Image: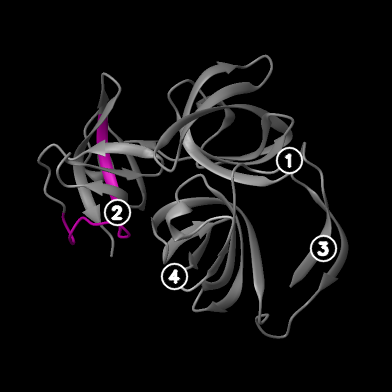
Amino acid sequence: MVVEGDADPSTGVVTASSIRPFASAPEQVRLHGTITNFVSSSNFAVRGVTVNAAQASFVNGSAASLGNGVFVDVAGSVSGNVVYASTAQVFSAAPEGGTVDYEGTVSQFNPTTNSFLLTWKDDGQTMRSPVALASNVVFVNGAAAQLVDGAAIEIEATNAAGTLQAYTVTFKTIPGASGNGSSPGTAQTSGVVYGYDATAGSFQISGLTILIDGVAPTGGKLANGVRAEVQFTTTNGQNVAQKISIDD
């Protein structure tokens, strides 16, 4: 279906002015938001939807402009749960009132004001953005008590007056449990691998940089674009792999 309306930047709630159902998938769809899980111009996500922009016509940029954290407006057709973009507009920054999706780590959390600083990557560049929790915030894979300094999270938020108003917070790591063969002090995360650097012996997943440290992946080959589950420990600010399982 297609929903049109006005979004409240403080809560992320859309007040619909019209709703049009489709008997089948629409010929054209549009996605506005920040890029996550960037592997290449033919494999990235916007608002959780996989996009292929290899054949897109670009406005205010090119395929080389794409990367994690970049705000885009893409239009195209749907096939097999993938949007094949015919046009892609690249923004230098998220517009006022725009919906963003960032993965990063928490610091300077203030439980009194329900605010914190999120450190995230914008096409490889480290960024820090102030975040305030919306009154209707929803926590996924965890609870409010887990929102502490150092937590790895993904937020859906509205860009409002220089502050991100987060209405969804998803925890990207969970403590290791003895039932899955992990050791005390380990955490685990899963997602799409990107930023794989064989020379540096590292890759990124769920907004975290993981050091491979000689660990041999099981279930497949480690490469950009594969889905993986990683168990790791954190020492001196570095996330060191203990086990890497390829899901593909």
The crowding category of the residue bearing disc 4, from other C-alpha atoms within 10 Å (few below 14, some 14 to 19, many at least 20), is some
Q: Residue at x 56, y 77 (%)?
A: 78
Q: Is residue 89 above or below residue 92?
A: below
- Most extreme residue toward the front is 60
Q: Position of residue 54 (x, y in %)?
A: 44, 70
Name the residue tied to disc 2: 228
Picture quarter containing residue 24? bottom right
Comes first in the chain, label 2 or label 4? 4
The residues tagged by marks 4 and 3 sit, at their Cα atoms, a distance apart of: 28 Å
> Is residue 139 rendered magenta in the image?
no
Residue 22 visible in the shown view: yes
- Give the residue number, with chain letter if any, for mark 1: 96
- Secondary element type, mark 1: loop
Disc 4 designates what residue?
Answer: 54
| In-image side of 137 versus 229 (left or right) | right
First of labels 3, 2 by sequence position? 3
Cβ–Cβ under 8 Å for marks 2 and 4 = no
Binning the other alpha carbons within 10 Å of mark 1 as few (below 14), some (14 to 19) or many (20 upward) gives few
Q: Amino acid at mark 4?
A: Ala
Q: What residue is disc 3 on? A: 4
- What amino acid is found at the position of numbered circle 2 in the picture? Ala
Number of numbered callouts drawn: 4
